[in-house]
Amino acid sequence: MGSTLDPSLAPSAIGHGESGHLTRLDRWLAQRLQSMIRAARVRVELWDGWSPYREGSRIGDLVVTDRRTLVGLLLDPHMQFGESYMHGRLWIRGSLEAVIEALSQLPVAAVSWRDAIGRLFARSNTPVNARLNVHQHYDLGNDFYRLWLDPEMLYTCAYFPTPSATLDAAQIAKMDLVCRKLRLKPGDRVVEAGCGWGSLALHMARHYGVEVRAFNVSKEQLAWARERAKREGLHDKVEFIDDDYRSVSGKCDAFVSVGMLEHVGRAQFDAISEVIERVLHPDSGRGLLHFIGRDVPRPLNAWIRRRIFPGAYPPTLAEVTDDILSPAGMSVIDVENLRLHYARTLACWAARFAAARNTVRSMYSEPFARAWELYLAGSEAAFVTGGMQLFQVVFAPRESAPISWTRRDPFPVKVSVDHM
């Protein structure tokens, strides 16, 4: 997917001097912006074509269409870059992915005072607020996600076991990897916190003979999952429950959460810790957390929090072990980082999104389509450059016997994952 300067989509802004003739102040501000991003070899260009860039070869151009955008990029770049691109006031000439990746490799500044104040006044992910946050992102409509996800409707990092594996095959391989890490066996009782469109729950029941209670608060996803379970004759093995993860009760042999922990929020780590301790069987229990994380604590990008993932926070491994697993009486059994698998997953999604972009634009709007293409490109860049990590953590009650003697999987792969 590449986004290039297209004057036909912004005729009043490109080449017509929306902010009037350049002033000395405009040029000085542009020079300041250029100095901030010089190491990325990305050129700044103003609305009349003038640029302070004098470095020779470059990866691409940031075309600023008005004075307000120029000032915003200097005062609040983390928010205003996304807002300006989304609304067509900032354009990228060249490959969107290449430019975003280059900018992502610039040194990350300390948390700004705006971020600090925003965190103070941010709404906590209480059960009510969590539903609102989920509704904003996951209830956009199943028809939207069907345009660019795989047939299983999996919206989490895939696992590419071979270089030739397709996205569709890699998503099935990811589900099987989770099941094998949990050492699932027929008759196990499984709790899944945050089940998406239900594919993992159905995969566990179909291929491993377990009984699953899957919790979710997205109306759209639950409707899809329940209809599919009934259609495939698995409704007696999988129960899709419209409830918050904090309401989980009863004992289970395995607890699994794929792609939900990053939505819990830092202030709610004690809540999920209490759930894990309460429901996991002390003798036979084991669990797996699959989540977007970081190597160092940082809030999520401000624009992503506003437009894409409200309430989200990617934790570090230390935060997960110190604030969730250790207080729950759990020991870490295994940790794997699938960072580059997520970069490839996002590249696949971005390509599919680009192919469906005109449909997305007609369903929603041009700003919506631009926001999502920027989100996908920015996320891919974050995983390519190491700004984000993708962790799978296997754990078990501290005093229980290890779930395996070695790391070798005791189960054969259930499906062929080379080609589909």
Image (tube, rainbow, N blue to C red):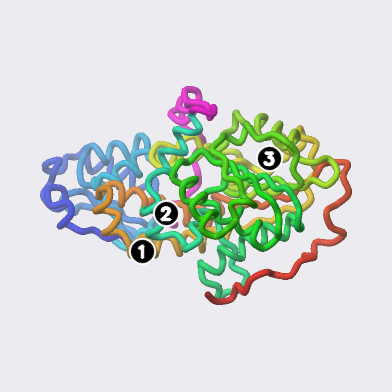
Query: What is the three-letter code of the residue carrying label 3?
Result: Val
Query: What is the three-letter code of the residue carrying label 2?
Result: Leu
As drawn, is 57 to the left or to the right of 323? left
Q: Residue at x 87, y 59 (%)?
A: 405
- Answer whether labels 1 and 2 touch (C-beta < 8 Å): yes
Query: What is the three-letter code of the residue carrying label 1?
Result: Met
Report the residue marked by disc 1. 1
Q: Residue at x 52, y 75 (%)?
A: 420
Q: Nearer the viewer, residue 376 or 116?
A: 376
Q: Nearer the viewer, residue 199 or 269?
A: 199
Image quadrant containing the N terminus:
bottom left
Quarter holding residue 93 = bottom left
Distance, label 2 to label 3, CA atoms, is 26 Å
Segment colored magenta: 100-128
Work out whether mark 1 precedes mark 2 in sequence or the reverse, and give the earlier one.
1
**Relative image position of residue 411 (x, y in whole percent):** 76, 66
Report the residue marked by disc 3. 320
Report the residue marked by disc 2. 376
Work out whether mark 2 precedes mark 3 in sequence or the reverse, and give the earlier one.
3
348 to 291, vertically: above or below: below
Mark 1 secondary-structure assignment: loop
- Answer whether labels 2 and 3 touch (C-beta < 8 Å): no
- At label 3, counting other C-alpha atoms closer than 10 Å, the crowd grade (few under 14, some 14-19, many 20 or more) is some
**Relative image position of residue 95 (x, y in whole percent):** 34, 62
Q: Residue at x 61, y 65 (%)?
A: 173
